[in-house]
Amino acid sequence: MPVHPAMSSRFPLLEGVPSMQALMEDPRYAQVRDEFGAHPDYQVPDVRVRSDAAPGPHGPVPVRVYDDGDGASSSGTRPCLVWMHGGAFMAGSIDMPEADWTSRELARRAGAVVVSVDYRLCNDGVHYPVPHDDVVAAVRWAGKSAPSLGIDPGRVSVGGASAGANLAAGAALRLRDADGQPPAGLIFAYGVAHSVIPPVSGEHAALMREVPAMLQFPPTATSFFNVNYLGGPVSEASGYAFPALADLRGLCPTLVLNAEYDDLRASGQAFAAALAVAGVDVRQVMATSMLHGFLNLPATIGPVSAALDLIAATLREPAALPAAVITA
């Protein structure tokens, strides 16, 4: 299926921009940046939002709590999602659409409490395991805070997008091993499970030629991000840092959500296959016509809304969904 027009119609804006870093940081491209990410007609769900912090081994971990409840939060039966944004382990924030819009939409659609985690980024000497430890601390905090959050401590799932998906999966494995109990479910949205991304197929490579180079993730880029995350060679990576390296047996039910036009889909597909071999209840779903990072788009776009509905349904019943394909 062709790239969705919500994305392809904006490709011409990128002509002349030398790199994604320039687009995000260079003031000369501020207007391009604003136009490329502008969606003025989208109204985010109006849910209650508050800030809090989870105690962690590297200091307090800021979190933002999203709650669309009607005030009867003391019932303690609602599911909870601890959610991590992406950004190659070194960028992004809880203010970006992939964090804020997604959290609002899922709180509304799932009747859940969503805890968005402002984990430490791998800049200025910060490396693994710091972001991983922050996420584990936030998940533990959510479970221990169940009475005040109005959630069922047995219905706490973890999830994330891109680098955030990696962190969510690593936290699920750590909680399985250290606490003897993995989360209720795992949402792995266009994530990185491998220290070295598996090669794409010929058919996949042909699709990627339709995507501007600056929106692709060639091996040189993913290698840089992964080495920066680890603070050392990928040969020294553990399964908590890159979940595809782990013994996956006994992991919680998992939704792997891939984008059709995404180099990193190869990692998601291989991770889903490894989960299945390990006997994990896993569903692999592809959002056709979508690029990497599509949860930064408005929920008014069909495949984005369908993906959010699928995640919401998974939060309500992590082990009750069939495989599916999300189409435009």
Image: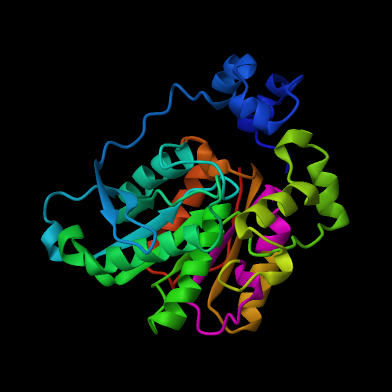
How far from the left and from the top, in percent, is residue 302? Answer: 53, 40
Outermost residue, front direction? 125
Which quarter shows the C terminus? top right
Which quadrant is home to the N terminus?
top right
Rendered residue at 48%/44% (across/down)? 305
Residue extent of the magenta highlight: 242-268
Picture quarter containing residue 323?
Answer: bottom right
Q: Is residue 171 above or below residue 247?
A: above
Residue at the location (29% across, 60% down)? 55
- Name the spot of residue 191 as percent of width and height, x first: 60, 57
Q: Nearer the viewer, residue 220 or 215?
A: 220
**x and y percentages locating residue 141 in the rendered image:** 29, 64
User: x%, y% of residue 289?
Assistant: 67, 43
> Is residue 213 covered in magenta?
no
Q: Nearer the viewer, residue 238 or 80?
A: 238
Which residue is rendered at x = 74% and y = 42% of the image?
216
Left-right relation of 127 to 289: left
Res 191 seen here: no
The answer to if 265 sits in the magenta stretch is yes
Q: Tag count in the figure?
A: 0
Rendered position, 268 above or below 278: above
Seen in the image, is 280 located left or right of residue 79? right
Q: Is residue 94 above or below residue 72?
A: above
What's the coloring here?
rainbow
Q: In this orientation, does residue 12 appear?
A: yes
